[in-house]
Image (tube, rainbow, N blue to C red):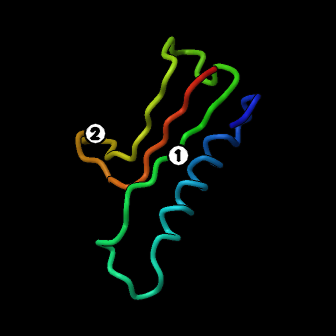
Amino acid sequence: MQIAWTSDFMQRMLFGASRAYVNQLSKGEQYDYLKPVYGLGLLAENFDHESDHFYHHYKIVNVDKPQRELNGLMKFIKNG
């Protein structure tokens, strides 16, 4: 949870979710054991002033083919 928007917020969200994803396995373990990781960010202000949406869902996708996505890391941000 964060009160005010900062330019580093999205990077911090991605870093935290990535760390949680990576820390699921020890050296030599099968990737099949990985579970999805969800990062939830709560802000007391609107960080995306170009959108009227209250809830934002981000995922990692292929820029040329957005229907192709990398599962595992997703971010949700709720504006307060």
Q: Is residue 54 above or below residue 9?
A: above
Q: Which residue is mark 2?
A: 66
What is the x, y in percent for residue 80? 64, 20
Q: Give SS at disc 2.
A: loop
User: Quadrant of the rendered structure where residue 57 is?
Assistant: top left
- Crowding at mark 2 (Cα within 10 Å: few <14, some 14-19, many 20+): few
What is the x, y in percent for residue 79? 60, 22
- Please state which of the two labelled residues, at mark 1 or mark 2, is closer to the viewer: 1
What is the x, y in percent for residue 41? 60, 37
Q: Is residue 52 above or below residue 40?
A: above
Query: Residue drawn 54% across and 32% down?
Result: 77
Query: Residue drawn 52% across and 18% down?
Result: 54
State which tag comes first along the sequence, 1 or 2.
Answer: 1
Q: Is residue 73 left or right of residue 79?
A: left
- Crowding at mark 1 (Cα within 10 Å: few <14, some 14-19, many 20+): some
Q: Which residue is mark 1?
A: 39
Query: Residue drawn 58% across and 22% down?
Result: 48
The amino acid type, in three-letter code, at marker 1 is Gly
